[in-house]
Image (tube, rainbow, N blue to C red):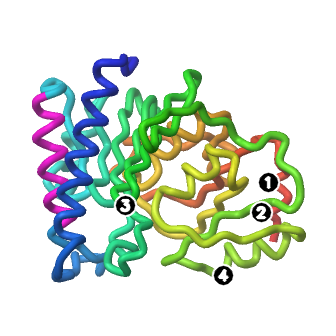
Amino acid sequence: MRVDDALREGLIAIARDAADAILAVYAGAFEVERKVDASPVTAADLAAHHRILDGLAALTPAIPVLSEESADEVPWQRRRGWTRYWLVDPLDGTREFVKRNGEFTVNIALIDDGVAVFGLIQQPVGGALWYGAPGEGAWLREGGAERALRVRRPARAPLRVAASRSHPDPRSRALLARLGDAEQVALGSSLKFCRIAEGRLDVYPRFGPTSEWDTAAGQAILEGAGGCVLDPQGRPFRYNRRDTLLNGDFLALGDPDLPWRSWLRE
């Protein structure tokens, strides 16, 4: 399924509506609760979730939605039969939201036969919006202007490596040591994919738990800009293939020709 101009603009309107709901909470005092897995959730997560679900139900009523905030209500036995669906993280980077550093996003992706065929990422603070589709391109819409995105290819030393601001881990630090001449940039949420798509960063290694809604929109945008998201065996990430919604390890690359296999050798 191709996302045409009318559908894209409808999705952008939904993402911006969700961003407004997030900022309304962000502007005041809010409580932080904990889910079963100890991850944080706020009224902003839930407000954005409902805005997006209502918007998608009106825009594409025939396409089901899998959102982080209601994923427990959609068992594997039901979603395993979905060939096309929206994969949503209403507020990616809740920890950054709680820290009030602005590095959180709204993520909406269209999955078709396991492939992220379109992705949209909205940053509520500042209003920047990225969207893209593999094989079609990627764009940044900001301040009333829009520009096409391309990764930095070929990537040259020093490589600019995205590091998770809230999820540092020893394996990522070890990989950074093997890269040699590299600049580490701490950044939250799916903004790491966006910065690689813009050519401002080169690599994002992730050795630790993420969920499918954390990566799908960013993958579509990054692939649209000429990059890739690979598992340690070099396979592109695919979605809705297992009963778990947790991702394995991955590398997001601006330049797919980088010698990433050598970086993974212990």
Q: Earlier along the polypeptide chain: callout 4 or callout 2?
A: 4
Q: Is residue 57 magenta?
A: yes
The residue tagged 4 is 170
Amino acid identity at mark 1: Trp
Q: Residues within 10 Å of mark 1 (few under 14, many from 20)?
A: some
Task: Determine the residue positioned at 31% across, 36% down.
Answer: 12
Q: Which mark is residue 71?
A: none
Query: Residue 106: horizontal and vertical position, in percent?
Result: 33, 52
Distance, label 1 to label 4, CA atoms, is 18 Å
The residue tagged 1 is 260
Please give left or right for residue 25 compared with residue 264 in the image: left
Please report contact status of discs 1 and 2: CB closer than 8 Å, yes or no. yes
Q: Residues within 10 Å of mark 3 (few under 14, many from 20)?
A: some
Distance, label 4 to label 2, CA atoms, is 13 Å
The residue tagged 3 is 125
Amino acid identity at mark 3: Val
**The magenta segment:** 44-58
